[in-house]
Image (cartoon, rainbow, N blue to C red):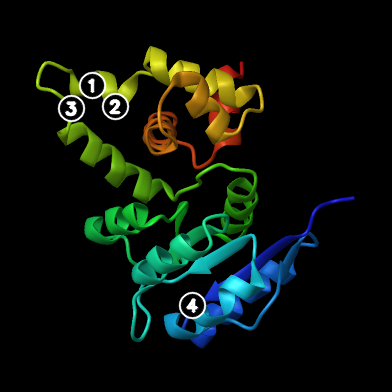
Amino acid sequence: MQKTITIVIVEDLVDHQFFLNTIISSVPEFKSIHLPFSCCEDALEKIPSLKPDIVLMDIGLPGLSGIDCIKKLKFLCPEIKFMICTVHNEDENVFEALKAGADSYILKNSKPYQIIDAIRELYIGNAPISSDIARKILNHLSLSQTTNQHKSNLQYHITPKEAEVLNFLSQGHTYQEVADKLYISVKTLKRHVYTIYLKLHVDNKTEAINKYFGP
């Protein structure tokens, strides 16, 4: 029997609430377990008792921002996975959200099937992100590399470490299991994965594995 993925939406704009609700209701294994919250204060009060698998979180909300909300909820409910779903793709928002504990970052202009795939990927332990966001992360990582490293190698070639990551992921290991095997943190592993996504021009783990190991 297929596991139901329970979802809560935190979004203040009615048309965006409708858009996300329509996507969720179109997938048999997805279930919205509460009406969308339009502000963080209400979400903070109710989400801990609802215990959803995934929270779709906007950033620009009245009162507390979605980033502040994730910080507080991640402390209260570390088992919940948070997907930023927003129109904001500024560098500051991206990195603040990831530092706050967001597990995924998807732009609202993504196609419905991309959001559906991202929710499924996030549920099984991956960290799907929009390609525009991956590019920003790669640019940030590129600037932080030591000066004796060639930028072209970072941009166009899978490194031995990245190849190890892909190999373990292709065997069905979770992010935590791969991180343990490589003796790195999950946060560091996600950085490797974001870089792989951009190098291979893909948006999720399945596409990365198929492209790297495929014919």
Q: What's under tag 2, amino acid-wise?
A: Gln
Q: Which mark is residue 44?
A: 4
Amino acid type assigned to the residue bearing label 3 in the image: Gln
Disc 2 packing (10 Å; few <14; some 14–19; many ≥20): some
Which residue is label 1 attached to? 152
Q: What is the C-alpha distance between the residues marked 3 and 4?
A: 38 Å
Disc 3 is placed on an element classified as loop
Mark 3 and mark 4 residues within 8 Å of each other at the beta carbon: no
- Indicate which label's residue lies in the foreground, 3 or 2: 3
Circle 1 SS class: helix
| Contact check, label 2 and label 1, Cβ < 8 Å | yes
Report whether residue 104 is seen: yes
Characterize the local packing of mark 1: few (<14), some (14-19) or many (20 or more) Cα atoms within 10 angstroms.
few
Q: Which residue is mark 3?
A: 145
Among the 4 quarters of the image, the one containing residue 172: top right
Task: Give above or below for 65 relative to 74.
Answer: below
The local crowd at label 3, few if under 14, some if 14 to 19, many if 20 or more residues have their Cα within 10 Å, is few
Question: Residue lying farthest right?
Answer: 1
Q: Which residue is mark 2?
A: 155
Q: Quadrant of residue 190?
A: top left
How far apart marks 1 and 4 lie (CA) works out to: 44 Å
Check whether the beta carbons of the residues at disc 3 and disc 2 lie within 8 A of each other. Answer: no
